[in-house]
Image (tube, rainbow, N blue to C red):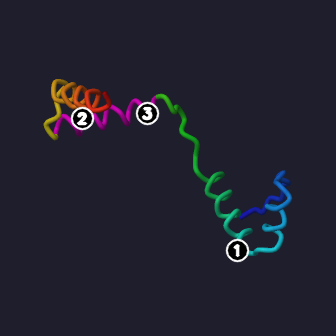
Amino acid sequence: MTTLTFEVEVEDEAAERIRQSEQERTRINLLLKSLVETPPVPDPKKKIFETMDRMSRIAQSNGLTEEKLAEILEEIDQERG
């Protein structure tokens, strides 16, 4: 494993809190590590459409039809007035 050192601009209060708290530094380290170790989604548009298609198949397999969905959305519109 490699350690990187870099500078981040933060407000004075945050800087002081980070300097004084080992727990805060550990928390930030874990957040940054998670951020940089998570591979980026190659094509976010493709991913969301795949997710929507999967949700649609699940809904259909549970008996949701376009007609039932239209009824549900109409009820919601009516409730909102």
Residue 3, by quadrant, is bottom right
Identity of the residue furthest to the front in this view: 81
Residues 76 and 32: in front is: 76
Q: Are marks 3 and 2 in contact (CB under 8 Å)?
A: no
Q: Quadrant of the N terminus?
A: bottom right
Q: Main secondary structure of the magenta part?
A: helix
Residue tagged 1: 23
Cα distance in 3D space between marks 3 and 1: 36 Å
* In the image, residue 10 above or below residue 70: below
**Is the residue under label 1 in contact with that under label 2 (CB below 8 Å)?**
no
Query: Magenta includes 52?
Result: yes
- Distance CA(mark 2)–CA(mark 1): 45 Å
Residue 15 vs residue 52, the one in the foreground: 15
Q: Check disc 1 and give the amino acid type.
A: Gln
Amino acid carrying mark 3 in the image:
Ile
Q: Position of residue 59 (x, y in %)?
A: 22, 37
Position of 44 compared to 8: left or right? left
Mark closest to the chain's N terminus, 3 or 1:
1
Find disc 2 in the rendering and name its residue: 57
Highlighted range, magenta? 46-61
Q: Which element carries disc 2, helix, strand or loop?
A: helix
Find disc 3 in the rendering and name its residue.
Answer: 48
Please give the name of the residue rendered at 54% of the width and 35% of the height, measured from the top-left corner: 42
